Image: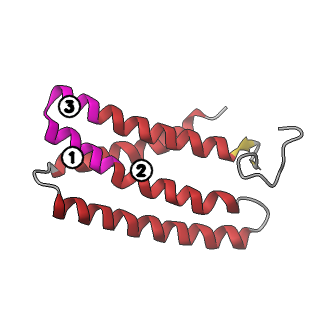
Amino acid sequence: MEGANQNDPGNIQAGGHDTGLEIRRGLKFQSLAGLIVAGILALAVDTVAAYSSLFGSLAAFIPAVIFAAIVAPKFGNDSAAFLRAAVLGEATKLLLIALICTAVFLWVDPLSPAWFFAGMIAVIMAGYSGLFFRK
């Protein structure tokens, strides 16, 4: 982008791509996937399957947002700072996933574990699919 502020994380060019836009696109795909799966399950299966899937989606989506918030500002020329942020972000993401899964399995009853993990997998895969829709 000509004239863009190169210090703004939303405008950083990485390999000719707007990194901030790609992060937002991936997170948008993830949130939509979680909502679509839960909506379909609410109509086709039952409410337990729908909210189980939604909790699974949130168990993957919330840590992804936190990871993006930690790592995105560190894109740039300082690879050491980026690596530190990536390690911290990944550790934080894994801890949050474990905490959310533990909380859901302890406090949500009834819960459908199969639909919980289906929602989680749908959100994770949607994040990867966002990589295929680059300009």
Where disc 2 sits, the SS reads helix
Quadrant location of the C terminus in the rendered image:
top right
Quarter of the image for residue 17 reads top right
Residue under the image location 58 percent in, 42 percent down: 24
Residue under the image location 88 percent in, 38 percent down: 2
**Residue, far right:** 3
Residue at mark 3: 42
**Residue, far front:** 107
- Residue type at mark 1: give it: Ser
Q: Position of residue 68 (x, y in %)?
A: 56, 56
Where disc 3 sits, the SS reads helix
Q: Residues within 10 Å of mark 2 (few under 14, many from 20)?
A: many
Left or right position of 119 against 23: left
Main secondary structure of the magenta stretch: helix
Residue at mark 1: 52
Q: CA distance from mark 1 to mark 3?
A: 10 Å
Residue at mark 2: 61
**Residue, far top:** 43
Residue under the image location 28 percent in, 49 percent down: 55
Q: Position of residue 4 (x, y in %)?
A: 84, 43
Total count of labels: 3
Residue 49 on the magenta span: yes
Q: CA distance from mark 1 to mark 2?
A: 14 Å
- Residue type at mark 3: give it: Ala
- Residue type at mark 2: give it: Phe
